[in-house]
């Protein structure tokens, strides 16, 4: 399957929103009948703010003229440190391939394209979160575990 990756901008926000909502429903196992109107509006605002300023770079993958997957990177800054003197970061997210199209290289192509976008901007820190299903794709591209990370789950009762 020949995979083509293309950047998607604000002019295609409705297409991006359709993909984003598909991703959220699958990754979080959200039933089709459950309304996500508030979350959808928040994602639309995010794209409207971040796409024009290049705070977010989005792409779609196609095979044989059919869109099969998507992905994005959030470009941010953190405090500079010895392992990241510029503070520039790229957080890969929303990397997704439709279940019927998986296992044919689209996921790897999306990740490689996004990493290339980050490297073209000389971003030294590129990271992501993954599901167990995605670990092989990311590992094959060169990602390694970050054992020193922790988080407070949404709704955590300790602070």
Image (spheres, grey):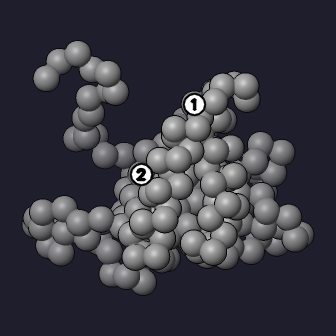
Determine the residue positioned at 18% across, 75% down: 86
Q: Is residue 6 left or right of residue 141?
A: right
Q: Could you tell whether 66 is left or right of 42 in the image?
A: right
**Regarding mark 1 in the picture, which secondary structure is present there?**
loop
Q: Please state, as top left, top right, bottom left or bottom right, where the N terminus lies in the image.
A: bottom right
Q: Residue 15's spot in the image, x, y percent? A: 70, 61
Along the viewing direction, whichever of 127 and 143 lies nearer the viewer: 127
Image location of residue 150, percent across then percent down: 25, 35
Percent of width and height locating residue 30: 64, 27
Between disc 2 and disc 1, the foreground one is: 1
Residue 71, quarter of picture: bottom right
Q: CA distance from mark 2 to mark 1?
A: 17 Å
Question: Horizontal and vertical percent for residue 16?
Answer: 64, 60
Question: Pointer 2: what residue?
Answer: 128
Q: Which residue is mark 1?
A: 28
Task: Identify the residue at image location x=42%, y=83%.
Answer: 120
Quarter where residue 59 is shown: bottom right
| Residue 148 visible in rendering | yes
Contact between labelled residues 1 and 2, with CB atoms less than 8 Å apart: no
Q: Could you tell me which quadrant the C terminus lies in? A: top left
Q: Residue at x 25, y 40 (%)?
A: 149
């Amino acid at each position: 399957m020949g995979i083509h990756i293309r950047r998607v901008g604000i002019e295609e926000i409705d297409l991006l929103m359709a993909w984003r909502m598909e991703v959220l429903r699958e990754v979080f196992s959200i039933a089709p009948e459950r309304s996500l109107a508030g979350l959808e509006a928040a994602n639309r605002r995010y794209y409207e703010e971040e796409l024009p300023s290049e705070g977010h770079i989005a792409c779609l993958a196609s095979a044989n003229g059919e869109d099969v997957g998507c992905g994005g990177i959030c470009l941010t800054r953190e405090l500079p440190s010895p392992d990241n003197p510029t503070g520039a970061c790229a957080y890969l997210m929303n990397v997704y391939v439709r279940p019927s199209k998986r296992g044919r290289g689209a996921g790897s192509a999306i990740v490689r394209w996004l990493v290339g976008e980050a490297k073209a901007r000389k971003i030294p820190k590129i990271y992501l979160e993954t599901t167990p299903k995605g670990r092989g794709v990311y590992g094959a591209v060169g990602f390694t575990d970050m054992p020193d990370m922790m988080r407070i789950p949404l709704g955590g009762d300790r602070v």
